[in-house]
Image (tube, rainbow, N blue to C red):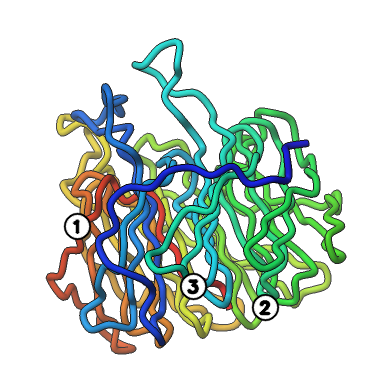
Amino acid sequence: MASHRLVLIGLVAVLAYGTPAGAQIAISANDNKVMLVNGVVQVVRNPPADTVTILDLKAAPPRVIAEIAVPASVVGPPTSVAITPDEGLALVTAAMRIDPNDPSKQTPDTRLSVLDLKSSPPKVLGTVEAGRGAAGVSINRQGNLALVANRAEGTVSVYTIQGKTVTPVGKVTVGDEKSGPSHVAITPDGKMALVTRDGDDRISVLNIDGTKVEYAKRDLFAGLRPYGIDVARSGAHAVVANIGRNMGDSDTISLIDLRAKPPRVVETVTVGQTPEGITLSPDGSLAAVVIMNGSNKAKDWPFYNDNGKLILFRVSGTSLSKAAEAPIGHWSQGAAFSADGKTILVGNMVEKDIQVFEWNGTALRDTGQRIKVNGGSAALRTADR
């Protein structure tokens, strides 16, 4: 078990001071360790520090509040950051670090960084230990429990949150080290979580009772390599992105009926190549899906395209239907909605920026705004409420 005491780590220059009153925070976790060279991910020699960019989504247009140094990684779903419901703390995982024995390679990391968003300026409080390959992280709507999916060891780490103190309380084993737990999403009542396992193509159900978290020994089967997952605020449904083998085939997203007894997959639809990120609108009626679309491949690859796609799907009962789409950047990752559902952010790894879209209920519009971030935007999140 890791020490419960937080170990202080440094921070870099802050671009602005404090969190404005009434702000709605979005956070981009930015990876500086890797770059894409003609479809091949390469480790950067002597890279600058990874960062997180803190954004005010209530501002028009959205603006940067601060940017600080925090270990981050593009490996894993683009949900490696989570924010408490009161927007006081953020947790950021670091799935990979540069291998100290071979700087041309990466090796699994175990760090979970804790950020104080209320301080002026925002700062890193410290780190706690997670599992190898710590990837997707979520905080319950009650703000007192966090779960981290550890991709390289088949476990989920459990933490309590009290004020500004994050304490590890154990791990739950869901599979072997090749099962690839990728992200974990918690239901609004805080009593259940769903863990995507891209290594063995299933979604595991966890039961939660206070700080006691157990594998329910029940799995759902949605599609090939379930990866990103999000649960509606109502608790009625969840959506999952099945990323497939990244070989040019069209991949899928699935809808999970959480009100069914027991919960089950009720629809799966084809969306295109590699749905990397998926998130639901605040009212749960819309799913935003970030499609790589071959934009992360070499230009002479048969299925290469010179842009990714943001595709919106309406959720109606147990059905999914396409509502809109728009081109995005290359090797794109996460998406996030504003609280009113009218602004959508998309993070682009290659361009090292965040695109800003507007949604009026029927049409999706690229505003033309690009928010530059210090590193490739590897994850993007707002608070679950």
Of 114 and 130, the residue lying toward us: 114
Q: CA distance from mark 1 to mark 2?
A: 34 Å
Left or right of 240 in this view: 348: left
Element assignment for label 2: loop
Give the quarter of the image for residue 154. top right
Element assignment for label 1: strand
Which residue sits at x=63%, y=74%? Answer: 237
Q: Quick check: 213 above or below 112?
A: below
> How many C-alpha atoms fall within 10 Å of the one at disc 2: few (<14), some, or many (≥20)?
some
Where is residue 86? Give x, y as percent: 56, 77
Where is residue 187? Give x, y as percent: 69, 70
Of 276 and 315, the residue lying toward us: 276
The residue wearing badge 1 is: 372
Q: CA distance from mark 3 to mark 1?
A: 24 Å
Left or right of 209 in this view: 204: left
Of 362 and 115, the residue lying toward us: 115
- In the rendered structure, find residue 280 and report the number of the disc placed on it: 3
